[in-house]
Image: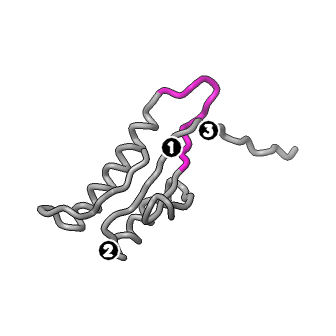
């Protein structure tokens, strides 16, 4: 998902638009996590970028996207850019001390 979300609509209030964007992003994560995993893969990992514009986007962790949206809503920005790309992930085993 590479998208610039607009938070302005003539008939909808700003807070409703922000919540609709949060819902769309959560739905995208759920849809991607429910896809079949390739052979030898433990989970779906995500490369995420967030910013006011595509040029200003910086890398963030998937869990931080909601906090970033909250910051945008506090600033009352009219739009923001989100990029979320799914990739296969491998769990790293902890070294056993014996």
What residue lies at 38% left-to-right and 43% top-to-bottom? 28
Along the line of sight, which residue is nearer the eye, 43 or 8?
8
Along the line of sight, which residue is nearer the eye, 49 or 38?
49
Q: In the rendered image, which quarter contains the C terminus?
A: top right
Q: Residue furthest left?
A: 11
- How far across and down, in percent of the image, does residue 47 sit? 55, 48
**SS for dot 3:** strand
Give the left or right position of residue 74, taking residue 59 as reference: left
Give the spatial CA distance, label 1 vs label 3.
12 Å
Residue with the mark numbered 1: 85
Give the left or right position of residue 59, taking residue 83 as reference: right
Mark toward the start of the polypeptide (2 vs 1): 2
Residue with the mark numbered 3: 89
Q: How many other residues sit within 10 Å of disc 3, few (<14), some (14-19) or many (≥20)?
A: some
Where on the picture, by quarter, is residue 22?
bottom left
Residues shaded magenta: 36-47
Residue with the mark numbered 2: 76
Where on the picture, by quarter, is residue 77?
bottom left
Give the spatial CA distance, label 3 vs label 2.
35 Å
- How far across and down, in percent of the image, does residue 46 sit? 53, 45
**SS for dot 2:** loop
Q: In the rendered image, which quarter contains the N terminus?
A: top left
């Amino acid at each position: 998902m590479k998208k610039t979300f607009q938070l302005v609509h003539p008939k909808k209030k700003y807070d409703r638009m922000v919540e609709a964007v949060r819902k769309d992003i959560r739905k995208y994560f759920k849809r991607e996590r429910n896809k079949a995993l390739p052979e030898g893969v433990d989970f779906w990992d995500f490369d995420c970028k967030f910013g006011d514009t595509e040029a200003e986007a910086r890398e963030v962790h998937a869990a931080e996207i909601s906090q970033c949206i909250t910051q945008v809503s506090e600033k009352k920005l009219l739009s923001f850019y989100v990029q979320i790309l799914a990739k296969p992930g491998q769990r790293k085993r902890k070294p056993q001390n014996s």
